[in-house]
Image (cartoon, rainbow, N blue to C red):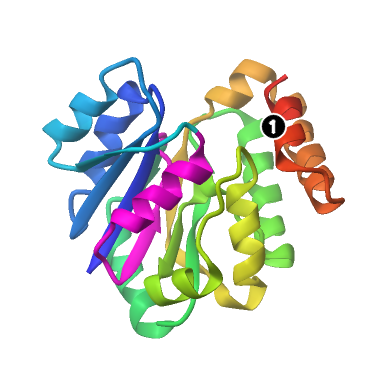
Amino acid sequence: MLSVVVPTLDAERDLGPCLERMADADEIIVVDGGSRDRSAAVAEAAGARLVVAPRGRGHQLAAGAEAARGDWLLFLHADTLPDPAWRDAVEAHRAEAPGKAACFRLRIADPAWQARVVERAVAMRVRWLGLPYGDQGLLIPRSLYDRLGGFRPLPLMEDVDLVRRIGRRRIALLGAEAWTSAARWRRDGWARRSARNLFCLGLYAAGMPPERIARIYSA
């Protein structure tokens, strides 16, 4: 059984298409962190299970995993849209590497050349460092997730924290892409947002508490 877990916070605009695309999942859980828009109504209309949790992806993802019934978990951001054939890629991975986690190949939903540069940089980071971010989705066997202790209640870097515990050798690339929103890059600028992401990752690797990094990330 495959459970898809989607954390939301005022994600009404993106959530509907995401849930429609993931309709082939055995179970969809939307974990809302206190949205003031119609995110909860969109989730319920799509037939997803709605879970309410404290705001913050670490809290929300952990709550979704706890509520999930599947023996495989797929964590996915609301503004990320996998290929239509995503389920085939998931099934192929489960058959070929049943003990490993996996992520989608990142694509950014923007025609700008800067988007292609970011995609290539992310591909290199995943290949050489084994560090996919949450906007690539994370597929993981429930047994491995539980053994590692799952998501920690961090305000930021919850995805990097778990991926580091999984380890590079236990993460594979799925044979499918996932398109994520370019809103952050458009808002902050391609170079500025990318540099800030890399800077925050460096601070985390140097041991700075995620609470302090979150303030820098949101500045």
Amino acid found under the numbered disc labelled 1: Ala
Mark 1: few/some/many CA within 10 Å (<14, 14-19, 20+): some
48 over 171 or under it: above or below: above
Q: What's drawn in magenta, residue-wise? A: 56-79
- Quadrant in which residue 164 is drawn: bottom right
Q: Of residues 14 and 189, which is closer to you in this image?
A: 14
Residue 214 rendering spot, x and y as whole percentages: 69, 32
205 over 88 or under it: above or below: above
- Position of residue 139 in the picture relative to residue 121 (left or right): left
- Position of residue 8 in the picture relative to residue 152 (left or right): left
Q: Of residues 10 and 146, which is closer to you in this image?
A: 146
- Position of residue 11 in the picture relative to residue 153 (left or right): left
Number of numbered discs overlaid on the protein picture: 1
Residue found 25% across the figure and 31% down from its top: 16
- Secondary element at image label 1: helix
Q: Badge 1 is on which residue?
A: 214
**Residue 103, magenta (yes or no):** no
Q: Quadrant of the N terminus?
A: bottom left
- Position of residue 91 in the picture relative to residue 103 (left or right): left
Residue found 30% across the figure and 72% down from its top: 71
- Quadrant in which residue 94 is drawn: bottom left
Q: Of residues 119 and 55, which is closer to you in this image?
A: 55
Residue 32 rendering spot, x and y as whole percentages: 35, 33
Residue 176 rendering spot, x and y as whole percentages: 41, 59
Residue found 44% across the figure and 53% down from its top: 177
